Image (cartoon, rainbow, N blue to C red):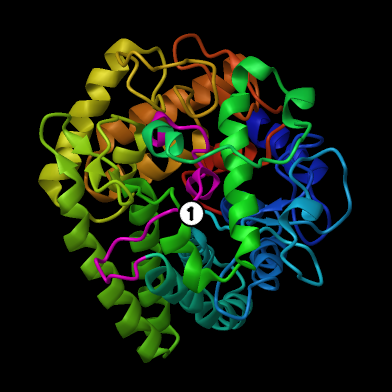
Amino acid sequence: MTHPMIEQAAEILRGNDRGSYTVPTHGLYPFQWNWDSCLTALGLAHFDEARSWTEIDTLFDHQWEDGFVPHIIFHEADDGYFPGPDVWQTGRDVPTTGITQPPVAGFAVRRLFDRARDTDLARRRAADLLPRIARWHDWFYRCRDPQGTGLVAIIHPWESGRDNSIDWDAALAAVPTDGVMSFTRKDIQHANPDHRPTQAQYERYIWLVQHFRSLDWDHAKLHDASPFRVVDPGFNAILIRSCLDLAAMADTLGQGDIARSARAQAQKGLTALESLWNDAHGQYLCHDRAANTTVDSPSVGGLLPAFAPIPAARSKAIVARLEVIGKRSEYLVASHDPDSAEFESLRYWRGPVWLIVNYMIADGLRTAGEDAMADRIVAESLHLIEQSGFAEYYDPMDGTPCGGGSFTWTAAMVVEFLTKGRVPA
């Protein structure tokens, strides 16, 4: 018998389906988001395998000529979201933004490929996607790592997926606000303002958009031109994992050049990632490339490298960190250390639990043989759903649901957790 939570998740996925893409939730996020779609495809595959491939195909149908893949695609007009296409002005036939998001596509496509029931369909769709994903990865290392360090930088907080993380506070303070357009936020009309980024943060977000727009979205220029350049270990771990997954698929599908290039990118990234390890915190930390300083901020971004094949000693240290955090909160994994003075249990990425992060950390820990902690993360994630429904994120102290409701990727992750990744025969 189907688990009732799977049935509820399926209903949410159907309700947010727009035919060839899903929206994260009604109202608050009315368009297609990059990493939302890739992770959502994992849930869709349990019910409609062809539809799951289409989700990612639709995203890559809007890849730019230089290999860049945008973080939002504005398929239909909707004035309920800010900033919309009129602010971004990227000049695309179908409007998109000009910044990107965590490159989880390589991982998601391999997971669809490895689990496929229709193997002919999977081989065709993956073979078509692989060169496009490789071009995106190449874009990252060309445009976001111009010095060839092996680690890429984000140039806008939104690119991290962790929009208002405490990790960005110092770097964002260096972003000016002079000349920022007058604007009316729409997010706080759909969600509790106490759960969202502040107005001061939004002014800097928009200043960066205006600045990049003034440079005609020339990605060869934006990294060096941005006052916000931060190397996020979690973002890089996702890219590294996706490179390795891309290489594995490319080997299977006879695309040897892609396999060799992706594996070399991943190995260089893994070596460089060690420069971000911090013994005092027992986790990785961000590096502010613009200021050339370590960001002393113990966030979930420094735990996400568990998703990549980091050294066993690092995985064990991250488990130890999670055990400490788990004693300070009711639910894992808080997006910031609850003992930090800046911790806010309800405000977006400054404390709340997100199931997609839990999924990636648990997946990496299980691969590393740290099953007990992976099991704990999954169990606490499902308890959150039982208590508080399919919210965007949750207070780690008491499970209060926050942000949008009937949330697509939350539903997809629940399906993944409950099925342990297995799809019906």
Q: To which quarter of the image does residue 372 belong?
A: top left
Of the residues shown, which amino acid type is indicated by label 1?
Answer: Pro
- The residue that appears at 79% across and 50% down in the rendered structure is 17
Extreme residue in the front direction:
178
- The residue that appears at 58% across and 37% down in the rendered structure is 177
Mark 1 crowd level (few <14, some 14–19, many ≥20, 10 Å Cα): many
Q: Quadrant of the C terminus?
A: bottom right
Q: Is residue 397 left or right of residue 56?
A: left
- Above or below, 256 relative to 151: below
Asked whether 149 falls inside the magenta stretch, the response is: yes
Residue in front for this viewpoint, 203 or 235: 203
Q: What SS does tag 1 mark?
A: loop
- The residue that appears at 62% across and 30% down in the rendered structure is 392
Q: Is residue 225 left or right of residue 87?
A: left
Q: To which quarter of the image does residue 414 belong?
A: top right
Q: Is residue 23 visible?
A: yes
Magenta region, residue range: 145-168
Q: Where does the image place residue 292, in percent across and percent down from the top left?
A: 24, 48
Q: Where does the image place residue 281, in percent across and percent down from the top left?
A: 17, 29
Residue in front for this viewpoint, 400 or 254: 400
Q: To which quarter of the image does residue 143 belong?
A: bottom left
Q: Where does the image place residue 129, in percent across and percent down from the top left?
A: 57, 77
Q: Is residue 40 visible?
A: no
Q: Is residue 18 left or right of residue 225?
A: right
- Above or below, 273 relative to 138: above
Asked whether 249 falls inside the magenta stretch, the response is: no
- Above or below, 329 relative to 354: above
Q: Main secondary structure of the magenta part?
A: loop
Q: Where does the image place residue 218, in percent across and percent down from the top left?
A: 57, 71
- The residue that appears at 33% across and 54% down in the rendered structure is 237
Residue pointed to by mark 1: 102
